[in-house]
Amino acid sequence: ARIEASNPQLNAFITVTGDSARQAAAAADKLLSSECGERKFGPLNGIPLALKDIFVTEGVRTTCASKILDNFIPPYDGTAVRKLKEQGAVILGKLNMDEFAMGSSNETSAFGPVRNPWNLDCVAGGSSGGSAASVAALQTVAALGTDTGGSIRQPASHCGVVGLKPTYGRVSRYGVIAYASSLDQVGPVTRDVEDCAILLGAVAGHDRADSTSVNRAVPDYRKNLRQGIKGMKIGLPKEYFIDGLDPEVRQATDEAIRVCREMGAEFVEVSLPHTAYAVACYYLVATAEASSNLSRYDGVRFGLRVDEGQGLIDMYMKSRAAGFGDEVKRRIMLGTYALSSGYYDAYYLKAQKVRTLIRQDFLDAFNQVDVLLTPVAPTPAFKIGEKTADPLQMYLSDIFTIPVNLAGTCALSLPCGLSSAGLPIGLQLIGRPFGEETILQAAY
Ligand code: GLN
């Protein structure tokens, strides 16, 4: 009922799976009321959840918010989705996003923008805009998103909810449509930190079907939540507190620092000297990998085919021209260029070297501190249409989230205030690789 009432304004869901959700809910209910309890009831039994439309779902249309996958019905569930179902979760449907997760405002979706529940004229953020907006608007208890360069944390920040990008390798990406494979990670979007810990624990772990998932025990992420932050060393990277930062974001961050200090945390200024190169480096690595990943959409194997030309090449070109939106085409062109012979050394290889330096910055910082604290985005949610004409402006809105993906480590976004216009402001806590427990503890 809640989805039906609010989705026409918010546009957060692309597909609602009402019938199967009711069946799953009835099954969960039966399990809860049965006394014999042969199966242990986990905390997810009967809990309504929703999925970014980048997760392939058996028998349920999966579009990645692209026209090219408009009619794609996958034959299997990805690992994260399978795990949720096995734990009794009730899947409500598939959530809107930027096309192929390329964007920072959910405006590149072939299904139209998601609106921010706090102000319908503003963006929800992206690319997991549907995930953040649906949780904020109480359409679902929680959602899964993906984060390649900020796509969980930035929309969570703009919508006033909690979002976590786990360490690269923490969660299997089997059955998650690939954007930039060396950066993509799956993570939870929730109303509070405890839900975030539960949902992360439910999907984390090694998976034989994803060779990049790491074989490492999954801790009980709820265990340390109430330990407080007394004596915790928190780093403030000086490169993140810059002139372009909105004064209200700055103020909310300073207030959060004051509260943490009062609770016994110790603050240290640190430096991440290669921060200035992160956005440029990211847009070479991400577009290069995207151009390769998206070559599979050829009109033959999946989705849309425009078959009125002369021969195979013509069919490829017409299908891709009709199926991909402008931003996706821009990325494919940039990435193909960066990988071309003669340019590879100057661009892609150089970007990989810079990436190593950025990662080293973080590892050095974590020799001094337990956690880093920064803003999530330089401004609160902007107006729909405000940045669509200027891709560079749009890319710069991920300046504080992108370095974390390049470094492969974990970070979360949690609400820390409201702007004078009544829009949420988020705070980012960055942890060392596989330090999810520590950032969840600090956030709680
Ligand atoms: N906004 C960034 C991009 O467009 C990040 C997107 C993401 O994390 N999926 O690439």
Image (cartoon, rainbow, N blue to C red):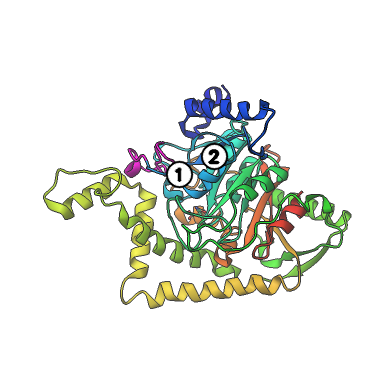
From the viewer's side, name the closer residue of 422 and 23.
23
Q: CA distance from mark 1 to mark 2?
A: 10 Å
- Say if the magenta span includes residue 64: yes
Q: Is residue 51 magenta?
A: no
Other residues around mark 1 within 10 Å, as few (<14) / some (14–19) / many (≥20)? some
Look at the numbered disc 2 and give the secondary structure of its residue: helix
Determine whether label 1 and label 2 are within 8 Å by CB: yes
Magenta residues (range): 55-73
Q: Is 415 positioned to the left or the right of 105 in the image?
A: right
On screen, residue 170 above or below 156: below
Q: Residue at (66%, 53%) from the top-left corner?
A: 412
The residue wearing badge 1 is 77
Question: Is residue 380 visible in the rendered structure shown here?
Answer: no
Closer to us: 260 or 78: 78
264 left or right, relative to 429: right
Tag 2 residue = 85
Q: Looking at the picture, how far across and down is residue 336, in whole percent?
A: 33, 64
